[in-house]
Amino acid sequence: MNDTKRAARKKHWWRIPIRIAFGIFGLWLVINGLFWWMQERFLMESGKDSNGYVERKNLKPSYNKYLSPRIGLLTEKEKSEPRIEVAINFQKFDSLSQPLRGKLFYLHGNRGSMESCRFEIEPFLDAGYDVWTMDYRGFGNSKGPISEINLLADAQMVYKEILKTEQIDIIWGRSFGSCIATYLAKENEPKRLVLETPYWSLPDAGCKRFPFLISQLFRYRLPTHEYLSYVKCPVRIIHGTSDEKIYFGSSEKLETQGKQNGQDIELYRIEEGKHNFRPSTENPSPKMDQAFEDALNKCLDLTASVL
């Protein structure tokens, strides 16, 4: 009997790799199904903050308001009322240096909120810029159903509200916010667009980092390269060559496309820079910090031009 079983196993040995293949295929389907179902949780980490950064405790906004697409500006009390389905929080911080060099609109990444990302705007304030910034739906105190259309429309709504009182010189988008910033630059007329660790498109960045994902399952396309083609103002890009989240080649492709289109565009490489290459107490790197500071100064110099 035992000999019969062994003979049968030898005869059907090929079933084992097939079962393994089907198991791997099933796992792949499950992972992609979960991603499609819960991709907002994977793509937008509004509840997670960046660590290792020392923030100025006395840095407070000079302007803090809420906008609703249907109602417009909201009072502090109105934004909490049940009938208000959408409330977009946006703030202004005054320059910490004089003379004033200009106005900057900052779009932060997919992690944290305006409050937890406040350390990111400090270099702009020190350089003499007033900074406007906003939280996307579901981030910070902003609320409402989120989608790609809503992300772009909300940013345009806030931008138009700002333009009622003052002009924006620089639109600055970091990481997740880079496509939104590029869209704003396409629709409006800033003096400069700056993209910090940008992506070619969200599916391109996601599938590069996680090759097992199906690009067609991304509900958020956010095609930075498409919007960039229509941007008329000068474009500056900052990216670390060792970025572990958004591969450096994304920025190289954006720069190449821009130059082929005859745009005023330049990429500043931060050698060995990771995704978060801003000065940090956890991973200090004087060389990298200096490279970022040099790139920062060039991007904020509105008198500089490539062409």
Image (tube, grey):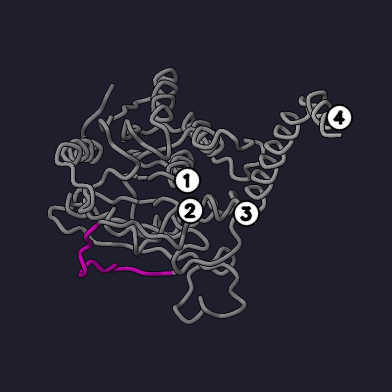
Look at the numbered disc 1 and give the secondary structure of its residue: helix
Which circle, 4 or 2, is nearer the viewer? 4
- Residue 180 shows which numbered tag? 1
Mark 4 and mark 3: span between their CA atoms?
50 Å
- In the picture, measured across the screen, residue 173 lies left or right of residue 293, that is right
68 or 215, which lies in front? 215
Above or below — where is 186 with respect to 75? above
Between disc 2 and disc 3, whose residue precedes?
Answer: 3
Is the residue under label 3 in contact with that under label 2 (CB below 8 Å)? no
The circle on residue 38 is: 3
Contact, mark 1 vs mark 2 (Cβ under 8 Å): yes
Q: Earlier in the sequence, mark 4 or mark 2?
A: 4
The total of numbered circles placed on residues is: 4
> Mark 1 is on which residue type?
Ile
Quadrant occupied by the N terminus: top right
Query: Amino acid type of disc 3?
Result: Met
Question: Which residue position holds label 2?
Answer: 155
- At numbered mark 2, what does the secondary structure look like: helix, strand or loop? helix
